[in-house]
Image: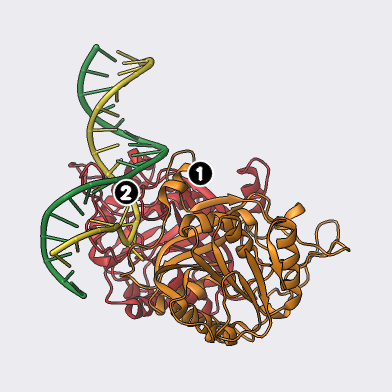
Chain colours: A red, B orange, C yellow, D green
Amino acid sequence: MIIKKIKNFSNKSDIENSVIVGDCFAEMKKIKSNSFDMIFVDPPYYMQLQNELYRPNNTKVDGVDDKWDKFKNFEHYDDFTAAWLKEVKRLMKKNATLWVIGSYHNIFRVGNILQDLGFWILNDVHWIKSNPMPNFKGVRFTNASETLIWAVKDKNAKNYTFNYEEMKKNNNGKQMRNDWYFSICNGNERLRDENGKKIHSTQKPLPLLERIILASTKKNDLVFDPFAGTCTTAVAAHKHKRNFTMIEENEFYVDWALRRFNKNFKSSNLKS
Amino acid sequence: MIIKKIKNFSNKSDIENSVIVGDCFAEMKKIKSNSFDMIFVDPPYYMQLQNELYRPNNTKVDGVDDKWDKFKNFEHYDDFTAAWLKEVKRLMKKNATLWVIGSYHNIFRVGNILQDLGFWILNDVHWIKSNPMPNFKGVRFTNASETLIWAVKDKNAKNYTFNYEEMKKNNNGKQMRNDWYFSICNGNERLRDENGKKIHSTQKPLPLLERIILASTKKNDLVFDPFAGTCTTAVAAHKHKRNFTMIEENEFYVDWALRRFNKNFKSSNLKS
DNA sequence: GTGTAGTTTGAATCCTACG
DNA sequence: GCGTAGGATTCAAACTACA
């Protein structure tokens, strides 16, 4: 198994088990249609945080203020969303499935646009967090969830992969429901630099990605993630013997993803 | 307490604790702006059921095939949604809140449009069903949830009602989260005719509406529901000493709602 | 090593009254 | 409308320190 970091991607490159460094739109364009069995997308949520927020003990909440989460308005966010959704649709095999994760800030935009583009929703899935951040001011319900949409390219896509029996086995013999319970990504799993600073502000928990992979792909399938970040999707895919292609613009994230592979899979033969 | 059924509503009628029979758009137009403290909407979901569905034992699933859930396409559904959302916004007091319930079929349309209209989302709330219908074919995750959106008219609306402490008290002393666990409406609560046929195909569980009322209204507030059906919203409001105004087109539903009031509140002085 | 207490922190659209 | 001062507000998990 060779995992490659590709810095100047050409459309002739072998993209299996690769992390492509570059702008997702530019890089996606170079990939040929109908390439992937499953696509997972964790796009910017466009959080629109209004003010700084302090906990009751006066410590400041480290909110998401990354440049990549800034948009001018919904119209710009929608254009961005439609652009990657169209490209992603082109890259899906006929019966491939798409997963998108989001919060109430953006998921209605995403869901609306993907329906407009002809995607057919199979499920909405609720990631219910066991340890969410409380609502410190007591002015709303604790926001303890994120939403995933699982969809096929169009209404007529049949024979998409759903490992029903395996899901059932992992759920005490009862069919798996669309409410999923996982902790937020923290502890040993969370990538941090030597000062304890988070490498990525929104790293997803590995068990979440593992369930997605195990539910909707077969062994040796090729999984794609256009906003790969620190490549949790790739780790989950590799762990379960699926292949992957990742795109990530920020090389800093990619280098940490490679470290992560080195640490998690001693036996991997890493080439970077 | 007098509960009225109003058949020919004029804008001079007293609308407190009334059920107005008529088309929701026509009737809403007659109501003056800034009338309501909280609005709950359970619109048609536009389910787009493709085929008839049978259980493993070959009995037929009684799906939602009511005329009121039929739309030509998403564009028509969106027009319809935007129309009632605009009217509802006009009827909300400055710091009133709006609740909308839906499923993955329609909630992305609703959420998108209400954001476009300037509503500011406070929470998405997941009603997690303890007893959902299983996925008989084993081709998707069990669809065990519906989604509610809770919003204010615009970003600057402050001092909306949120009974934080009461919610906390009802949740073992911890702040209430956005994942809510209720059974589907069944048993004694479910309205059925003498043949056991459901009166309304999508009657909501009373405890769900009670939580909504208790969380987001004060005593004597005026609650509005433009698609009232069998008036679960009114029952919850009345039970907790809130006032209500309902609109429902189908007089059959309204008459059952009145029976329901008679049965649930012996002491009410019903006038129909 | 083990157990306990204390600390830190997480995709957050997080106040209100008054002048 | 705006600016500002006053005052009320948190849960679970994982980690650290220390006995």
Q: Residues within 10 Å of mark 1 (few under 14, many from 20)?
A: few
Q: Position of residue A114 (x, y in %)?
A: 49, 75
Viewer-nearest residue: A118 or A146: A146
- Please state the chain letter of the residue tagged with numbered disc 2 in the rendered image: A
Q: Amino acid at mark 2?
A: Phe
Quarter of the figure that contains the C terminus of chain A: bottom left
Can you tell which of label 1 and label 2 is closer to the viewer?
Answer: 1
Name which quarter of the figure residue A231 lies in.
Answer: bottom left
**What is the total number of numbered labels drawn onto the structure image?**
2
**Position of residue A143 in the picture relative to residue A256 (left or right):** right
The residue lying furthest to the right in this view is: B195
**Residue marked by disc 2:** A136
Q: Are marks 1 and 2 on the same chain?
A: no
Q: Are marks 1 and 2 in contact (CB under 8 Å)?
A: no
**Position of residue A22 in the picture relative to residue B14 (left or right):** left
Question: Which residue does the image show at 41% across and 46% down from the upper left?
Answer: B165
Question: Which residue does the image show at 65% across and 51% down from the upper left?
Answer: B183
Viewer-nearest residue: A49 or A174: A49
Viewer-nearest residue: A264 or A102: A102
Q: Position of residue A264 (x, y in %)?
A: 37, 42
SS state under label 1: loop
**Position of residue B11 in the picture relative to residue B70 (left or right):** left
Name which quarter of the figure residue B95 lies in.
Answer: bottom left
Q: Position of residue B170 (x, y in %)?
A: 50, 44
- Please state the chain letter of the residue tagged with numbered disc 1 in the rendered image: B
Q: Position of residue B233 (x, y in %)?
A: 60, 64
**Residue marked by disc 1:** B170
